[in-house]
Image (cartoon, rainbow, N blue to C red):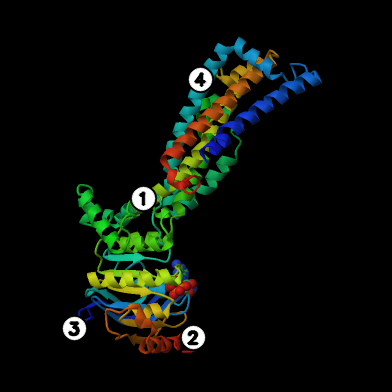
Amino acid sequence: MHMKNAAITVVAPTVFTVALFVLWEFACWLLALPQTVLPAPTAIWAAFRQFQNPIIENSLYTLWNTLAGFAIATAFGLLLGIAVGWHRAIYAAVYPVLIGFNSVPKVAVVPVLILWFGVGAVPAIITAFLISFFPIVVNVATGLATTEPELEDVLRALGASKLDIMRKVGIPRSLPYFFGSLKVAVTLAFVGAVVSETVGANRGIGFLMLSAQANFQVPLVFAGLMALAVEGIVLYAITAAIEMRFTGWAFRGQNR
Amino acid sequence: MTLSATAPVLVRLDRVTMHYGRGSTAIQAIDTVTLDIKKGEVIAVVGPSGCGKSSLMKLISGLHPASSGSVMVEDKPVKGPLKSVGMAFQASNLLPWRSVTDNVLLPMEIVQPHRSLIRRQRSKYKANAEALLAQVGLKGFTEKFPWQLSGGMQQRASICRALVHEPDILMLDEPFGALDAFTREELWCTLRDIQQARGVTVMLVTHDLREAVFLADTVYVMSNRPGKIVKVQTVDLPRPRDIEVTYTQPFQDLVHELRRYIGGQH
Ligand SMILES: Nc1ncnc2c1ncn2[C@@H]1O[C@H](COP(=O)(O)OP(=O)(O)OP(=O)(O)O)[C@@H](O)[C@H]1O
Ligand SMILES: [Mg+2]
């Protein structure tokens, strides 16, 4: 049973990923694609080795911006989600604005942010925040709103206040929704930070890729993309692990 | 223990009506209901679906106000949630992130004076909850999570949660509705024993006439919405009642008699 699980969770993704890269390498080789169109994985790896230091440095910078924006989004999203789930009036009041806001492409907001805050970390952090708080709000509010009315009656009949019900039932039961949304939010925050850097920045992986593109260093552009992908996977895995740790009860019956 | 004829009245409803909503779209759920529940009495409320049984519970527990008439508990008008009510429903509604014991202790974290005491005396409270769980046959399952229990066991735990703070009134809304017939009868006996041991007043809403007659001192039959009481049936079968009693003629006659009032022909 355990062996089978390991095969599914470790071997399957490894085989798939390796196969994908091998296929890619062969395709480039067979079709004799020029490096400026689609560099082969080996060429990307070579570019990575050559520019290792700037790639890592800029990646970390982007990572930092992402995490800063994500942290703000988490705190803000949690608070707003609780407020929205608290009362129907607050829900009715903020939802239209929230949805309108979420529909605005964040790329369009970046120039404004740069105008206000100048080129640097702040627009990237804010973009990361803006793009990632929405799913957190929606999920927390959903979790709160789905408290069983009968359970609420049980507690109200004991004289429980709204705050009691939130603390004992609403918030714990919305935690799986909350942590679930963090997985989505963290990857979105990452996208936000990179988008902002590609619009205007002087550091960061987005900036690095933009400069490489300007110099026709396509393998370097792809090396940057790879770095992004790896960081994205790591961030996702970390939040997923945190989710498992805090809300394992919500995954009951899947593995036990 | 048989209910004494001189037991004091705990709940008194006098010509009570109740509506959901206001104005022209209001739905009347209860229509001029007058009834008394004595301390230690077990009443059962039966009636067609949607007739206002759950509404009557909400009314007495103070979760929903009456539109007219008076609702008195211990000679005081009910203005808001009573705080001394234990409730259980058809769904056990246990919290999946808490162990069975911690689920049972939930009311203690809400009602005074336990609320202030429980943090310091958790182990004492825990022992009490475990003793209660043992009484309903859940010894050895106290540290399990609700989803590791069968439906019947979850329902036992849910009843413990409703009882743990020693409420004056236990309100059960179709508590055994989702269980199979054998488990249901087992739980009737559990409820019978625990009620007898504690002398708690019980209001039981059910669709099952046999259940009503087996458990109750008085059965109220309600009409279709808006719910009116169309029949009050005293059950004077001797207590303690054994499951065997359900196969006797007097029992069957009572069930038969009640059956006549359900179906809306009155
Ligand atoms: N929150 C509510 N808002 C508006 N109408 C309600 C509400 N709750 C119940 N009603 C209405 O009041 C009537 C009585 O409902 P109630 O839940 O008391 O019935 P019930 O006898 O418990 O039914 P069941 O046996 O199906 O549980 C129903 O017609 C229902 O439509
Ligand atoms: Mg009901």
Image-quadrant location for residue B159: bottom left
Tag 4 secondary structure: helix
> Which chain letter matches label 2?
B
Residue B129 at x, y percent in the picture: 26, 57
Residue B218 at x, y percent in the picture: 32, 82
Nearer-N-terminus badge (2/1): 1
Q: Nearer the viewer, mark 4 or mark 1?
A: 1
* Category of crowding for the residue at label 4, using alpha-carbon neighbours closer than 10 angstroms: few (below 14), some (14–19), many (at least 20): some
Q: Report the front residue among A45 and A63.
A: A45
Residue at which label 4 appears: A60
Image-quadrant location for residue B128: bottom left
Q: Is residue A101 above or below residue B190?
A: above
Q: Is residue A113 above or below residue A244?
A: above
Tag 1 secondary structure: loop
Q: Report the front residue among A94 and A172.
A: A172
Give me the C-alpha separation between circle 3 and circle 2.
34 Å
Q: Report the front residue among B2 and A141.
A: B2
* Category of crowding for the residue at label 3, using alpha-carbon neighbours closer than 10 angstroms: few (below 14), some (14–19), many (at least 20): few
Residue at which label 2 appears: B264
Q: Nearer the viewer, mark 4 or mark 3?
A: 3
Give me the C-alpha separation between circle 4 and circle 3.
80 Å
